[in-house]
Amino acid sequence: MNEVAYLGPRGTFTYEATQALFPKTDFQHTPCNSIPDVLTAVDQGEVAYGVVPVENAIEGSVNLTHDWLVHHVHVQVTGELIYPIKQNLMIHTQNRMLSPSRFTQVLSHPQAIAQCQSYLRKHLPNIDVTYVDSTAEAARQVAENPEENWVAIGPQSAGKIYHLSILSTDIQDYPNNFTRFIAVGKPWSHPSATPSGKKSSLLVTLPTDFPGALYRVLSSFAKRGVNLSRIESRPTKRKLGTYHFFIDAEQESNELDIIAAVDEIKAWGCQVRHLGSYPCYFFEKIGGTNRVDNRER
């Protein structure tokens, strides 16, 4: 059975996204402690596939993922999943009868806390905030300390794994809270779902002495009718003011329009690296239920 590394531990949103992309009936899931651990395991051939977050609708890009893809590993992006992020306020079952004012501390990952600021200010204005390594770790600490009036913020899977009660659901500040996860590794497609589209990711490095280079790059795609769904810059780490540009095009890289655009921008002295062409999936369209696999409880 092919092994899939993911940003763990069990009970995180990456854990849920991995189950959606790589069903446990067909793949073995292996949690890793960090994004670099996942990408390195794939790059070194220790596992066939990996799943990491790359962008959140509220908090923006995951820079660590981008930087490791550029500077440390040479892996291909082989799939994408748009996953709804639904944050929940969870408590130990022994504390179900407490009023909200009795809770003294909220635990979660910094991004989860950031996504729920308005809710916390309105409903738990005086509560202390403690940051932990993951939403699953927050759930674990609440589960193991029933004598403390603590609450955790995280996905339902974390609550189910650690047998917590959900005090409130969908507490994120913005309803359209989605995270884009990518699969990396060997060529792959979902065993049962049909993709909603195809996409190609390119890394473009501009020549330093070419005025208007970025405009020319974008116009090369525009005049051929290639729709670009994302443009993201990251420092090259070689010199202040120099950047790589991540570009996502809503076509496969072997289509003539993209080939022509890439050839043109290379002729101007730009460096282009193909990060992958891959299928794209929406969680709701692949039978998603935001439920943890029963065998994992």
Image (cartoon, rainbow, N blue to C red):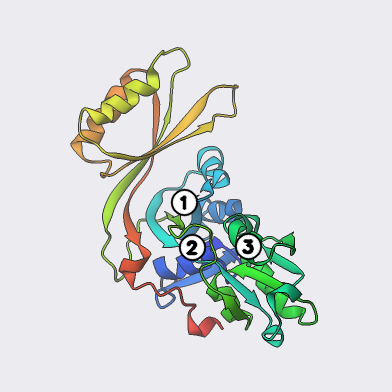
Quadrant, the C terminus: bottom right
Q: Which mark is residue 57?
A: 1
Percent position of residue 43, x then y:
51, 50
As drawn, 187 above or below 223: below
Q: Secondary structure at mark 3?
A: helix
Q: Badge 2 local density, few (<14 within 10 Å), some, or many (20+)?
A: many
Q: Quadrant of residue 106?
A: bottom right
Q: Nearer the viewer, mark 3 or mark 2?
A: 3
Question: Which callout, 3 or 1, points at the residue further toward the start of the chain?
Answer: 1
Inspect the image, locate mark 2, and give the three-letter code of the amino acid beneath it.
Ile
Residue 134 visible here: no
Q: Amino acid at mark 1?
A: Ala
Q: Is residue 271 above or below residue 119?
A: above
Q: CA distance from mark 3 to mark 1?
A: 22 Å
Amino acid carrying label 3: it is Lys
- Residue drawn at (32%, 62%) of the image: 189
Q: Is residue 58 above or below residue 295?
A: above
The residue where tag 3 is placed is 122
Q: Which residue position is annotated with label 2? A: 85
